[in-house]
Amino acid sequence: MNKQNTALAAAVAASLFLLVFLIHNAASSSSEIRGGDTAVAVPPPDKRTITSFYSLIYGPTICTDFGDPFSPWNSPWAPGSYTYHYRIIIPDDYPDDVLRVELFDPDSINRASNTAEVFHTVTAVNAGFPLFETQSCTEDQRFSCLLDTGELALTTGEPPLDFASINPFWLVRVDENRGAGTPPGNGTCGIPANYNTAFNTSTLFQLFYYAQNSDGTISKIPLSIYTGQVGDGLRDNGNHQTDLHWVSPGGTRLYDQPAYVPVDLGSFGDFELSIVNDLPSIMIDPYTNKRTIYLDITSLQGASGNGFDLWAGPLYLDISSDANVRNVQLVDDPLAHDAHGVFIEPLGIQPIHSAYEYPYEMPLLYIDARLAGESVYISLFDTDAGTQPPITFYFDTIPEEDWSLSFGDGDPDPDGVSGRCKPGSCNNIWVNPAYEIKIPGILDNCDWENPTPEDCTPFYGGYLMVRYNGGLRDTHVWQIPVVRPQATVEPEHSQIDTTPGILATHVFTTTWLENDWMSDLAVTDSTWPAQLDWSVARDPLGVARGTITVTVTPPDILWISDTFTLTLSNEPLATGTTRTTWNGLFLPQRVYLPLVFRPQ
């Protein structure tokens, strides 16, 4: 298919959509008006509407106080350039060859007008709302703005209306114009006196995957790159017109997409992939047959906040690129945009922008049933700006009345810790210590005559969910390291040359379990010298970037980072035998991780 629709096809499709949209919204329905949800239900991953929250990262020349602890170059937690990592998981039964990766509003450009025509859902029109009405924001172009559509009022009736049948908010702006000093910013906090595109943030989106070569080695294969625009007339002129639109750079231009969006010069491909042609030899999980591609997101220049979101699945020519129109389409017809099981998840770090003072909930990560009894340690950075306690954790597979944990509305918290900062009062600091969520499912101590949630709740796997009251324009970050079961493997090559001055490369292979994060690495070998330098090459998740070198004296704990703990011990083993033990950070496929030994 030609990636750029002809003008005639686009015009015909647009005309047909407008006609269908108007008829569909004006049509009568026998749906009963119900009411009552107290939190914004997270759309299924294959639906991806944008409600009161989305992802947002800041540029490198701003302070961390605005809610992004990593992107600013002067960050005390991650100095220098920082990249947010995501993975796109393709299920075994995905029925299409096309995998279209879509970016919502990848630019940091905010429209100037405060006025918007708000269209209503079928449910609202049937309840007496007009087909559309004019509404306006009260703040200027520097600030994000969501309009209350009024449809939330329909959730107060009896019996309660399913929240998924209404569209609560209309998007007007999703970015935050920020910066101090001379553009693109001096690293301190500030809001320009007037909207200034020179402070806007350019954001790099990079797709890649890992291929398994015929000799068993693993290669990182770049796919495509795209840099979101800023509209300052110097870096770019904003001609891609991606503000408030879903786009697939280099991919098919949807019928109402304002302009074709190309990939960056030098990109190997585009964001609309052919699994057969673009992903040859992609690594496959031997247990589930799932395939994974990766998306890295890095802010390159600027001080402003760039709001965005992600979706991946088949190409739908009849779905709008306009985020507001798409929201209405998908509320009216939830099956109109099925991702067929493709799921995008952040790798341990999830940046969030709450654009409206309203309760919401979202999935944090999937937990396998095998992890029953383990603990998840979750931290949260910079909840202020009106965010309110409690923060409630629960599983989508367990009724809340059977098991849930609420933090921040009492002291001590459910994990026994006292003195944490409360949600809404954590400006520029992390929740410390991290919330400990002990996964239920170990029933050994259950007294079935007097059951308790902690001892008597079965667990068969599910998404760990969180619900809390987000503040108006509160940007914050979730950090989700996980303690994982231990797996022991024998290295593929166990002999290490410990002759001083000789560089030896030790490669082992292991099966990594799906959806895991964080790790402890323990290596034992009776032939190791008293001291050596240890280098870890970048692994397939990119969490050990570059080379980390430390001096080791077995059996000390020698290095702790935000990715894993490295432990050496000197158990008496047969000469030349190396045992490698991983706790955590398993990938959903068989991988080779190079370990480089540089004896002194």
Image (cartoon, rainbow, N blue to C red):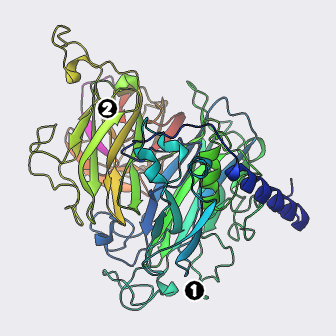
Q: Which residues are magenta?
A: 564-577
Say if the magenta span includes residue 569: yes
Residue ranking furthest to the front: 128
Residue at the extreme top of the image, as rendered: 449
Above or below, 67 relative to 127: below
Return the residue at label 2.
Answer: 525
**Looking at numbered disc 2 in the image, what kind of residue is underneath it?**
Asp
Q: Position of residue 366 (x, y in %)?
A: 43, 35
- Residues marked 2 and 1 touching at CB (< 8 Å): no
Query: What's the residue at 60%, 40% (across, down)?
Result: 342
Q: CA distance from mark 2 to mark 1?
A: 58 Å
**Whether residue 552 is visible:** no
Q: Secondary structure at mark 1?
A: loop
Image depth: mark 2 or mark 1 in front: 1
The percent position of residue 40, horizontal first and vertical second, equals: 42, 47
Q: Is residue 375 left or right of residue 232?
A: left
Q: Residue drawn at (9%, 46%), measured in percent from left and top?
A: 418
Q: Which residue is mark 1?
A: 232
Q: Secondary structure at mark 2?
A: strand
Task: Judge left or right: residue 470 versus residue 389.
Answer: right
Query: Image height check: is 294 above or below 186?
Result: above
| Rendering coords of residue 93 (x, y %) | 67, 29
* Dot placed on the residue nearer the N-terminal end, 2 or 1: 1
Mark 1 crowdedness (10 Å alpha carbons): few <14, some 14-19, many ≥20: some
Image position of 21 (left or right of 584) = right
Locate residue 240 relative to residue 523 in the image: left or right: right
Quarter of the image where one finds residue 595: top left
* 502 shown above or below 395: below
Give the camera-side residue of 215 and 289: 289
Tell me where residue 404 sits by quadrant: top left
Residue type at mark 1 is Asp
